[in-house]
Amino acid sequence: DINLAIERNDRLEKYYNKDHILYGILEFAGRMIALGHVQGLIGENSKICFGSTLKIINDKMRKIAVFFESCGIKVILQEDIDSQVWIKLRNNSTNVIFGLLRLTMGQGLIAQGTEEVMKMVRDEVIAVAKAKGIQFSAEELNVNDGKTPINPELYSHLPSTAQDMKNKKKTEIEFINGAIYREGLKAGVA
């Protein structure tokens, strides 16, 4: 699950020193294969991105990056990770669409009209981020033409929001889309 870094960091700062808080994203999916056991759906585009709330890189962070790299996962360690977090948020904000359609990612992306709705949702997320002063490189915004990535290993993947809807469980819609909404209100974005 992903939440806006600012909401989570504000909560964590009540209990921990800022110099102990790292945040970022995992850019791969997973599926539960048994209770307490999750299989990562790792592909060539999979990555872990993280940084510090203080916008610095130190030796402890470099050691964490080396550990994950030794496991065969691409790691991006950046002083300012906010753009990566918002790109991931942009991608995950469309998970609800797959749940409403009751389709896997691959099936949903070829369904007529889905791409247009997804683009509107993604554009709103980026508008909120930009209003908050988050800077994006052209490369970040244009990966996969700005669309939700669909790696071959994810074609048959049902995103977590869709799984929760299918299983009639509490969803992460408030956690993801609700956070975007609240940040949009603060930033003056409709």
Image: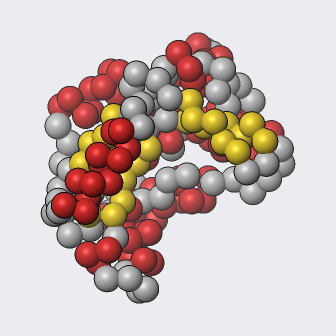
Vertical placement of residue 38 versus 36, above or below: above
Vertical placement of residue 24 versus 55, above or below: above
For the C terminus, the quadrant is: bottom left
Its colouring scheme is secondary structure
Residue at horizontal 33 percent and vertical 64 percent from the top: 22
Q: Quadrant of residue 29?
A: top right
On the question of residue 88 being in view, the answer is no
Residue at horizontal 57 percent and vertical 23 percent from the top: 154
Work out whether residue 10 or residue 93 is closer to the camera in this orientation and state it: 10
Considering every residue shown, the one lying at the far bottom of the view is: 14
Q: Position of residue 1 (x, y in %)?
A: 55, 52
Residue at horizontal 33 percent and vertical 34 percent from the top: 74
Residue 50 located left or right of residue 116: left
Work out whether residue 115 or residue 39 is closer to the camera in this orientation and state it: 39
Residue 111 located left or right of residue 177: right
Work out whether residue 37 or residue 163 is closer to the camera in this orientation and state it: 37
Q: Position of residue 57 (x, y in %)?
A: 17, 59
Vertical placement of residue 43 versus 129, above or below: above
On the question of residue 38 being in view, the answer is yes
Considering every residue shown, the one lying at the far right of the view is: 168
Q: Position of residue 77 (x, y in %)?
A: 24, 48
Residue at horizontal 27 percent and vertical 33 percent from the top: 141
Vertical placement of residue 63 versus 37, above or below: below
Q: Quadrant of residue 27?
A: top left
How many tags in the picture? 0
Q: Position of residue 46 (x, y in %)?
A: 42, 31
